[in-house]
Image: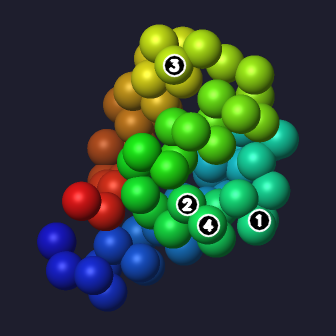
Amino acid sequence: MNEDRVEGNWKQFKGKIREQWGKLTDDDLDVIAGRRDQFLGKLQERQGLAKDEAEKQLKEWQTRYPDFRFRD
């Protein structure tokens, strides 16, 4: 997937991410910018989750939104 598509994908799904994890701020999402490792770190920090739980929640979310892709 090229960078333009990843960026568009990220912008499209930011709202859905905020619905699921409301403690993530717009600034957090700008810093994450579609990178999975950054996302997991912020998810753990803001939501107070252990790494395993953050991974589990993210996998469940991605199952609901199979069109979503992170940057490599």
**In the drawing, does residue 54 fall left or right of residue 27?**
left
Residue 46 picture quarter: top right
Indicate the secondary structure of the residue bearing disc 2.
helix
Q: Position of residue 13 (x, y in %)?
A: 54, 60
Pointers 2 and 4 in contact (C-beta within 8 Å): yes
Neighbour class for label 2 at 10 Å: few (<14), some, many (≥20)?
some
Q: Which residue is mark 4?
A: 31
Q: Amino acid at mark 3?
A: Lys
Q: Which residue is mark 2?
A: 32
In the rendered image, is residue 52 in sight? yes
Q: Which residue is mark 1?
A: 26
Q: Which residue is mark 3?
A: 51
Residue at coordinates 55% horizontally, 60% vertically from top-left? 32
Neighbour class for label 3 at 10 Å: few (<14), some, many (≥20)?
few
| Residue 42 badge | none
- Separation of residues labelled 4 and 1 (CA atoms): 9 Å
Q: Position of residue 15 (x, y in %)?
A: 67, 59
Q: Position of residue 66 (x, y in %)?
A: 31, 44
- Separation of residues labelled 2 and 1 (CA atoms): 10 Å
Q: Amino acid at mark 1?
A: Asp
Say if 14 sits above or below 3 in the image.
above
Neighbour class for label 4 at 10 Å: few (<14), some, many (≥20)?
few
